[in-house]
Amino acid sequence: MPLPTPASARPARYTAVAKLLHWVLALALIGIFGVGLYMADLPFSPQRLKLYNWHKWAGITILSLSALRLLWRMTHRPPSLPAAMAQSMPRWQHWAHEGTHYAMYALFFAVPLIGWAYSSAAGFPIVVFGVLPLPDLLAANKELAETIKPLHSLAAWALCALAALHIAAALKHQFIDRDGLIGRMLP
């Protein structure tokens, strides 16, 4: 991990790569969540199998992009909150700000890894784009799969809730506080 950068030396805006990864992952997560909700209630059919495979491929892609995003964030520190804003925020808002980001990053990894574990335990291998077989994380075990399945859903809903909180905070800063904070992440 790089040495901490003094706040005064940090850029006022996120880097172009950080912004690109933020928005690509945001759109990918919205898409995969919507597909996940839709496909879960479909009857067994070729369409359902196709969507499940697409969902797995997207999950592995999101896992890879999340790793890239985390690596980028560890080597390119994000800008500090503006000093006046940081000083005026109550302590609980600082905790919520930091905690939400840490929890979202954890879930960026947990949701696809739990899905991968479920798929492995259910006996359905992941073959990315139909050409790249991934190793099973667990041996096939239907009982274990039934235990893991709700964890994937719960983690996905938790990520959705945190993303909604993140969006609400950004909109509050933009339209209520009018402090321009959201401009740091806009293209």
Image: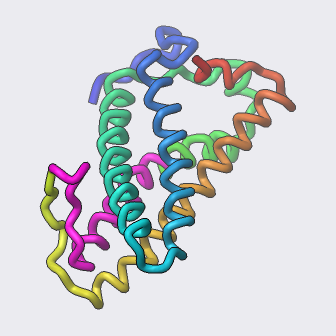
Residue 54 higher or lower than 94, as above or below: below
Magenta stretch holds residue 108 = yes
- The quarter of the displayed image where residue 12 is located: top right
- Is residue 70 located in the magenta-colored stretch of the structure? no
Residue 119 location in percent, x, y? 28, 71
How far across and how far down the image is residue 65, in percent?
35, 38
Query: Image quadrant of residue 74?
Result: top left
Q: Residue at x 56, y 48 (%)?
A: 30
How is the structure coloured here? rainbow
What secondary structure is the magenta-colored segment mainly? helix
Query: Does 17 sit left or right of 183 as displayed?
Result: left
Query: Would residue 142 be found to the left or right of residue 49 on screen?
Result: left
Magenta-highlighted residues:
104-131
Say which residue appears at 51% left-offset and 58% top-offset. 35
Give the quarter of the figure containing the N terminus: top left
List x then y, in percent, for residue 177. 83, 28
* Tally of marks: 0
Quarter holding the C terminus is top right
